[in-house]
Amino acid sequence: DGTPHIAKEFGVNYIWGAVGNKTVAQWRGLTAARASGYELVALMDDDMTLPETFVWDTYGITERGADALAYCIAGTNRNGTQPTWFIRQQDIEYKICDTIKAWQSECSSVQFPHGALSLWKASVLEMVLLDHDCIFYGDDIKMGITLARKGMRMGLARAPAVPTEVPVSVCGPIPNFWTQRVRSWDSAEHMLLPRFIGILVNGYVRERIYGTVLSKFFSL
């Protein structure tokens, strides 16, 4: 379809893979990045639009000790606008979610990134992907769970929200709200609920939360 030639015009290294699987594609890209000596690797969906002023927040990893970073996202249509009430409500949903991630980042660790955009230490991402079952449902949640189980930390990037395309109808042309949320995201959250409970009692997260609460108490 001409993708390799278009990618080349924009200086993008295109790698073709015979397996149509998101996790496998991430592994292929990670392998190529590590072979080229990159220490940080970004994962980004093709429906994201990076603003012209966008800058990768490496500070969160190099200075604040995070092993990976989640990014805030904003819901828009494919033109980067919010012309309807339906799109704006999804954007509010993302803002609420990112507010919770900001709290998690300050108290302990972000539970999992948005599947649309995240930044990882290459060595950490390799470890996380090797533990992945390659099943698409809840793939980003599983990555966060593995990170927590390994005793590692995910922070929230200090960057503006990045626009991502959201469904413009409930049951219209795919991607629509029903197929994205009800048949994918919501189903994954229900299936992974036991693992969420495991995160809540994870020793690393518990230690960070207790430490934060106690430090606030004794500083009064």
Image (tube, grey):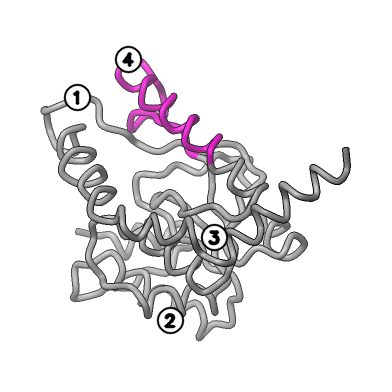
Q: Position of residue 125 (x, y in %)?
A: 48, 73
Q: Which residues are magenta?
A: 73-100
Please tell me whether mark 4 sits on a helix, a strand or a loop: loop
Task: Using the numbered discs, state the Cα–Cα distance from disc 4 to disc 2 in whole angstroms.
Answer: 41 Å
Query: Badge 3 is on which residue?
Result: 119
Disc 2 residue type? Thr
Q: Amino acid at mark 4?
A: Thr
The residue depicted at 57 percent of the width and 62 percent of the height is 68
| Residue highlighted by disc 1 | 169
Q: Which residue is mark 4?
A: 84
Marks 3 and 4, how far apart in space?
A: 31 Å
Q: Is residue 96 magenta?
A: yes
**Residue type, label 3:** Leu
Q: Residue at x 60, y 37 (%)?
A: 160
Report crowding for label 3: few under 14, some 14 to 19, many 20 or more residues within 10 A (C-alpha). Answer: many
In the image, residue 44 above or below residue 92: below
Residue count near mark 2 (Cα–Cα under 10 Å), binned few <14, some 14–19, many ≥20:
some
Is there a contact, CB below 8 Å, between mark 3 and mark 4? no
Image quadrant where residue 85 sits = top left
